[in-house]
């Protein structure tokens, strides 16, 4: 990751993603199945209450490790990213706007 000039925060997040996956499953990444990765992502959403964006970050880290380190695109390519959360713009009232 240093060779590709990843930001320190990206490197830290990617490594944390794979670490948390290993702690959740009790297995090394090369021994995991696609279903176990789904179970981990589901755990992040349902049990830990993480936002979609946080789960996207975890998945991005997992994708990097599986594609670049383990060369196992078969296990990670079919896992879709969660859709981004859509937020409505804040609308000001007439009084707030004139201040």
Image (spheres, rainbow, N blue to C red):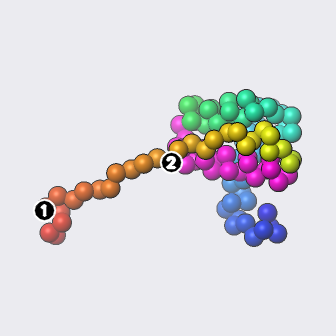
SS state under label 1 = helix
Residue at (57% x, 31% y) in the render: 47
N-term-proximal mark, 1 vs 2: 2
Mark 1–mark 2 contact, CB under 8 Å? no
Residue 60 x, y percent position in the rendering:
68, 50
Residue 94 x, y percent position in the rendering:
13, 61
Q: Which mark is residue 87?
A: none
Number of other residues with Cα within 10 Å of mark 1, as a class: few under 14, some 14 to 19, many 20 or more: few
Residue 92 x, y percent position in the rendering:
21, 59
Residue at (34% x, 51% y) in the render: 88
> Which quadrant of the view contains residue 48?
top right
Q: CA distance from mark 1 to mark 2?
A: 32 Å
Rendered position, 33 above or below 19:
above
Residue 13, can we see it?
yes
**Which residue range is magenta in the image?**
49-69
Q: Is residue 61 left or right of residue 97?
A: right
Out of 69 and 23, give the one closest to the viewer. Answer: 69
Q: Is residue 88 highlighted in magenta? A: no
Residue at (78% x, 38% y) in the render: 75
Q: Give the labeled residue for mark 1.
A: 95
SS state under label 2 = loop
Rendered position, 2 above or below 27:
below
Residue at (75% x, 70% y) in the render: 5
Q: Is residue 52 highlighted in magenta? A: yes
Q: Which mark is residue 84?
A: 2
């Amino acid at each position: 990751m240093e060779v590709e000039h990843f930001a320190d925060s990206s490197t830290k997040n990617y490594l944390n993603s794979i670490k948390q996956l290993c702690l959740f499953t009790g297995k090394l990444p090369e021994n995991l199945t696609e279903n176990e990765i789904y179970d981990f992502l589901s755990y992040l959403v349902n049990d830990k209450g993480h936002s979609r964006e946080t789960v996207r970050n975890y998945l991005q880290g997992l994708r990097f490790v599986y594609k670049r380190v383990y060369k196992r695109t078969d296990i990670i390519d079919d896992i879709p990213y969660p859709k981004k959360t859509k937020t409505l713009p804040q609308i000001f009232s007439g009084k707030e706007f004139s201040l």
